C-alpha cells in the first residue's frame, strides 16, 4: 500500500485541481485581450497568452476540469454499464446473452478510435457527442470481462447457498456476483483512464469534441497547432498537461494492478 500511496496522491492532486479549477485560475480563461495576444511566458502570464490574449495557464487549469472530469465520468459510465450487461449475460445466459455478446463482437471488430471518429462526426461533434461516441465503442470490453468473470464463479457454492436461502436473482447478482468481480473491473478501469483522456482529447484536436471557446486540452492544441514555430507555448502547455495526466494515471493503474495481484 505504501508503494501505491504516492500515485494515489498524485492522481488526487490532479482531480483536486480539476474540481476546483475555477478557484485556482489567476485570470478569467475566457476574457480576451487582443493587445496582449501571443505574449511569451513571463512573470505575469506564466505560460504566456494565446492568439486572443487569453492566459494559457488559466486555460490549462480550467481545461483540466473539462478533460479530466469528462474522461472520468465517461469511464465510470462505460465500466458500470458494460460490467452490468456482462454480469447479467453471464449469470442469466440464454438468448439475451447471445444477442448482446454478438452485438459486442460487432463493436469490437472496429478499431476503437476510427469508429469513435466516425460516430462523433455523424453525431455532429461537441464534447457530449464525442463522449457518446466513445461510450458506444467502449462498453463491450467491460461486458466481455465481467461476463467471463461471472461464468467462472456462477457455480460457486456460496451462490448455490444464496439460492437455497431464497434470494432472488437480482439480489444474488448485486449482493454476491458484482462485488466479487469488482476488483478486476476496477483495475481495468484504472488502466483505461489514460486511454480515455487521450481519445477524448484526440477527438477535440480533430474538431469533433469540445468546441471554441471551451477550454479543453485537445481543442487548445488544435487551436495552437498553426503557431507551433512562432508561439510554441500555446500548444506545448496543454500537450504537457495531457502527458503528465496520462502518465500519472497509467502509473497508478500499473501499481493498482500489482497491488490487486498480491505484488507488494
Image (cartoon, grey):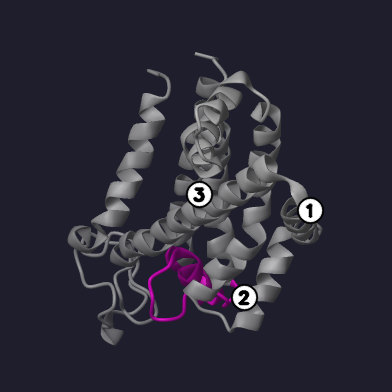
244 or 121, which lies in front? 121
Residue 206 x/y as whole percent: 60, 73
- Marked residue nearer the N-terminal end (2 or 3): 2
Q: Which contiguous range is marked in magenta?
A: 206-234
Taking the magenta stretch, the answer to whether it contains residue 228 is: yes
- Residue at x 47% of width, y 52% of height: 76
Q: Is residue 22 left or right of residue 242?
A: left
Residue 139 x/y as whole percent: 62, 55
Q: CA distance from mark 2 to mark 1?
A: 28 Å
Place residue 45 in its image quadrant: bottom left
Q: Residues within 10 Å of mark 2 (few under 14, many from 20)?
A: many
Above or below: residue 204 compared with residue 151: below
Place residue 192 in its image quadrant: top right
Which residue position holds label 3?
243
Q: CA distance from mark 2 to mark 3?
A: 24 Å
Which residue position holds label 2?
120
Which residue position holds label 1?
98
| Residue 250 shows in the view | no
For the N terminus, the image quarter is top left
Discs 2, 1 touching: Cβ within 8 Å: no
Amino acid at each position: 500500500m505504501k508503494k501505491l500511496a504516492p500515485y494515489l496522491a498524485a492522481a488526487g492532486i490532479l482531480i483536486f485541481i480539476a474540481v476546483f479549477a475555477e478557484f485556482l485560475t489567476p485570470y478569467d480563461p475566457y476574457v480576451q485581450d487582443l493587445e496582449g495576444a501571443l505574449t511569451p511566458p513571463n512573470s505575469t502570464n506564466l505560460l504566456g497568452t494565446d492568439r486572443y490574449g487569453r492566459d494559457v495557464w488559466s486555460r490549462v487549469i480550467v481545461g483540466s476540469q473539462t478533460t479530466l472530469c469528462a474522461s472520468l465520468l465517461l469511464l465510470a459510465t462505460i465500466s458500470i454499464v458494460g460490467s452490468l450487461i456482462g454480469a447479467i449475460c453471464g449469470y442469466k445466459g440464454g438468448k439475451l446473452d447471445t444477442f448482446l455478446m454478438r452485438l459486442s463482437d460487432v463493436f469490437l471488430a472496429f478499431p476503437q478510435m476510427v469508429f469513435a471518429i466516425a460516430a462523433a462526426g455523424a453525431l455532429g461533434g461537441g464534447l457530449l457527442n464525442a463522449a457518446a461516441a466513445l461510450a458506444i465503442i467502449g462498453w463491450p470490453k467491460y461486458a466481455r470481462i465481467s461476463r467471463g468473470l461471472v461464468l467462472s464463479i456462477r457455480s460457486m457454492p456460496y451462490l448455490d447457498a444464496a439460492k437455497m436461502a431464497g434470494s432472488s436473482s437480482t439480489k444474488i447478482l448485486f449482493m454476491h456476483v458484482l462485488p466479487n468481480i469488482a476488483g478486476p473491473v476496477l483495475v481495468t478501469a484504472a488502466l483505461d483512464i489514460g486511454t480515455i483522456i487521450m481519445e477524448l482529447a484526440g477527438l477535440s484536436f480533430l474538431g469533433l469534441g469540445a468546441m471554441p471557446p471551451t477550454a479543453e486540452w485537445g481543442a487548445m492544441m488544435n487551436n495552437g497547432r498553426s503557431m507551433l514555430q512562432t508561439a510554441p507555448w500555446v500548444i506545448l502547455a496543454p500537450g504537457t498537461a495531457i502527458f503528465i495526466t496520462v502518465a500519472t494515471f497509467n502509473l497508478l493503474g500499473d501499481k493498482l494492478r500489482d497491488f490487486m495481484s498480491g505484488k507488494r
